[in-house]
Image (cartoon, rainbow, N blue to C red):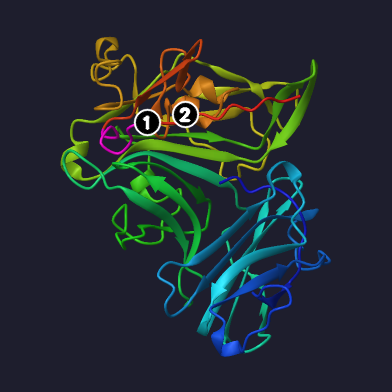
Amino acid sequence: MKLKKVLAAPVIGLIVANLALIGCTRPAQEKSSYAISIALPAETQSHLKTLSTATLAHVVVNVSGDGIAQNILIDWDGHNGAPPPASFQVEVPQGSNRLFQVLSVYKSDDGGMAFFYGDASTNLDSENPTVTVPITPLATAGKTFSGDVAGRYFDSAVSGPTGMLEARLQPGNKPSMVISRSLMIEGWFRTFTLSGIPFTYKLTNGTTLFGQNGLTMDSPVFAPSQTVARIVVPAHRREEWVNGTSSLRPEEPAIQIWGFFGNPTALADRRVCVDRTATELSKMIHASAATSLALLYAGTPPADLFQPSNNAYMLGGLPRSNALCPEALMETESYQKILKITPLLMNGEGKDRAAGFEIPFRYGSTNRSLKVDGTNVTATLLPGLASHISSFKIDRKSVV
């Protein structure tokens, strides 16, 4: 999940409008649900003293309570600077002790993020119920940036679980809050993480993954090893071409983590193999100089990734020259025993191509998940997915 831009308030008003047909009224006790309108009025930045210019980047709302099997989740992201809607709408079942939890993420011009959290309970059983949620800063360890964790998780020696994967935040002694949901199929997954903020990763059946609660991108389970690799990129500018014109777009630091996780027996003969031929990321430009980032395969990344740096770091995994990563096995064992990482593809194509897969597909020799031949479109599923997916559909849209 990328956390991007926009602006909000230290107090969020939840305005409740009854669900009813126009011209039709019913007694409150007959209502089964309410349409909740969540307004985010503009607010001064006096609460964000550690940030330069701050705008609202992300909003997450959870609603839970008796009879609500899974948290109701609203997840808005200001991708590419999109402004927030005038209000967010959610339908909540009637009932008592409805817990509303709100997480607001503010982002500064230099990529730093500040997190605000609030919650309140109310009974949705009156004619016009309302609730106000005051939000306060959530303590974090320094400036925060986002990252991804992707790969395959094994809950046995040969296979992984299937279900909805939730990234959950524990705000103090309050109930945990669902920040995102993504699909895990036979253990193949992609989820997000944040520097300095712990998350617990659970399937909706209650299973906790990675063996513990409260993980950050620096937790030992994600440390570089034979089965885990990561790329660490400091704050930089990315070269982009639009209509024949080149520009440099500032980007926050990022850490991408790839690997095999879970059952020790499954991990015993698996490895991540890294193509180490690239020496620079030519489209990732130094934050304040006109030089591209050098790509190093050893060393210690700087503690503060928001400070300008000459280097990006690809750590962990095994080099493709290693005896456990022979070229003869790169195709026959890829995605089975071997996960191939090509860090150079972070340069312009992004994290999915660097890892060689985009759930539910693996990439082919052209670094694409789909092969188009006239009107025929083919793709290769990741291992273990054939029993879950029998066909796929592509909708083609014309852009004028």
Figure quadrant of residue 207: bottom left
Instruction: Write down the residue under mark 2.
Output: 314
- In terms of depth relative to the viewer, which is nearer, 324 or 249? 249
Locate residue 236 relative to residue 343 in the image: left or right: right
Amino acid residing under circle 1: Ser
Labels 1 and 2 touching (C-beta < 8 A): no
Mark nearest the camera among 1 and 2 is: 1
Amino acid residing under circle 2: Met
Q: Position of residue 288 (x, y in %)?
A: 76, 31
Q: Position of residue 397 (x, y in %)?
A: 64, 28
Count of numbered badges drawn on the protein: 2
Q: CA distance from mark 1 to mark 2?
A: 36 Å
Residue found farthest to the front: 23
- In terms of depth relative to the viewer, which is nearer, 143 or 352? 352
Figure quadrant of residue 341: top left
> Would residue 388 be counted in the magenta stretch?
yes
Residues shaded magenta = 384-391
The disc, 1 or 2, on the residue closer to the chain's N-terminal end is 2
Position of the C terminus by quadrant: top right
Few, some or many residues within 10 Å of mark 1 (<14, 14–19, 20+): few
Which element is circle 2 on? Answer: strand
The answer to whether residue 298 shows anywhere in this view is no
What main secondary structure does the magenta stretch of the protein show? loop
Locate residue 146 relative to residue 218 in the image: left or right: right
> Would residue 336 be counted in the magenta stretch?
no
Instruction: Write down the residue under mark 1.
Output: 391
Locate residue 297 relative to residue 202 in the image: left or right: right
Q: Position of residue 72 (x, y in %)?
A: 51, 66
For image coordinates 35% across by 36% down, the residue present is 259
Q: In the rendered image of this protein, does residue 107 appear above or below residue 317?
A: below
Q: In the rendered image of this protein, does residue 163 appear above or below residue 365?
A: below
Figure quadrant of residue 239: top right
